[in-house]
Amino acid sequence: MRIDRTAAVARFEFVSVVKRWSYLLTTFGLPLFLAGVSGTVLGVQTYFLSQRAAQSSSFGLIDEAGVIDRSVFEERDGRSVWTVDGHSIILFDAAPDAENALEKGTLRSLYVVQADYLATGEVRAIQSDKTPLLSMRGTAVEPILRSLLRRSLLEGEVDQAVEERVISPAQFVRSRLGPGGAEVQDVDEALDLLMRTTIPLFLGVLLLTALLSASGYLVQTVATDKESKIVEVLLSSVTPEEILAGKLFGLGAAGLVQFAVWSSMVVFLALAASAALAAVVTVPWLAIVLSPLLFVLGYLFLGSLMLATAALGANAAESQKLTMGWAVLAILPLMVLVILLEEPNGVLGQAMTWIPFTSPLTVIIRLAVDAAGVAWWEVAGSITVLIVAIGVAIRIGARLFRVGFLLTGSRPSIGELWRQAR
């Protein structure tokens, strides 16, 4: 294989792709568009939920056992009402009045302390059918009622300090080890969870998108060359193997540039968010450093297979159908993303690390979630497996590519494909 001819094909493919408006818009505009849409949706949901949280919720309470301490309730409009944490708990003496209010929708739920409560501990909860489907405020009042029942049962029975500790046994002060092992307190759990899951998710999605995008360019250019009959012109100057290698390297370089731009934007947004929100964000530097290498290896493996199968198609539509299976295999880690985020070093994560189709994306996600839990030999082993798989894929792919590229006027038989692959 002549290096100068291969380099010429690679330069042509690289320049022809990066000059396209679609490539430039995807590379620079897509991350900004996704960030804008995600930020807008998140802002709207946050505003809606904050407005819902600001609204008072009314709950009914009936004390059939006579154990509730009524001193916390105050009289309002002829009703005994206790307001705490934005919840209004109305104490009813008669069940029909409470059930009527529940039926009208003025109460979210009605709680009835059963007459045999001291023996069974049973409190019946009746929910209104007008309660919003996804609202969690109905169950949010239950810890408050538990505290009220504890206070009522302990009133005058134990020392006041002991009573307070029974009612509220622990005030958890959460912290997390930040960069450099420094302990950071007052961690916002929701924000911490969002940042720790968003970065691995974005890195994984961007890596997969770059892989499929670059491989898609391979399929498109091969189909275009065959449909436009430019194959005969190309084969007069270069061999099929040189065309395959040139397309792989040229379009792979374009995909690598695209992934580098996306990864830089993700890191910049993560650091900017941590500074703006005064939060501790652990940037997965090891995953980011290794991502270009894993992209190149994953692209060479997946791209060589897609290039070979694309050459067997008679047109662009058929080529895309033939390569769809490889894309589905590459997407597998995203299908089980919840498991990988929850147990990055579990059996499934470790198994997918050693499968060439899923290895690049799985390793990136595992390193981004818990780099300390990934052994060095797992990373080295996955890279080794990918290199061996690339050698096999390129060897078989080059033969199938030659058959598909040369037989432009007819479809090769299964026997011919098997004979060439061997």
Image: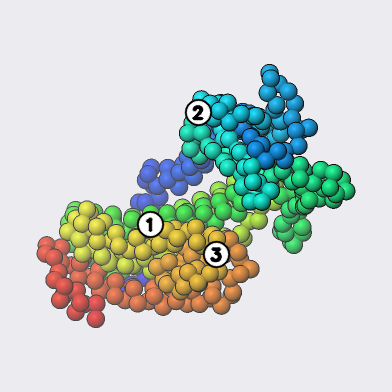
When the figure is inspected, residue 371 is found, relative to residue 208, above or below; the finding is below
In this view of the protein, which residue sits in the foreground, 197 or 256?
A: 197
Could you say which disc has been placed on residue 103 in the image? Answer: 2
Distance of mark 3 from mark 2, alpha carbons?
45 Å
| Number of the front mark, 1 or 2 | 2
Query: Which residue is tagged 3?
Result: 343
Distance of mark 1 from mark 2, alpha carbons?
55 Å
Instruction: Please indicate whether residue 214 sits to the left or right of residue 72 in the image.
Output: left
| Number of the front mark, 1 or 3 | 3
- Residue drawn at 55 percent across, 64 percent down: 343
- Residue drawn at 47 percent across, 54 percent down: 205
Colour mode?
rainbow
Instruction: Please indicate whether residue 245 sits to the left or right of residue 48 in the image.
Output: left
Q: Which of marks 1 and 2 is nearer the N terminus?
A: 2
Query: Which residue is tagged 1?
Result: 212
Quadrant for the C terminus in the image: bottom left
Instruction: Please indicate whether residue 308 sits to the left or right of residue 103 in the image.
Output: left
Q: Tell me if residue 133 can be seen.
A: yes
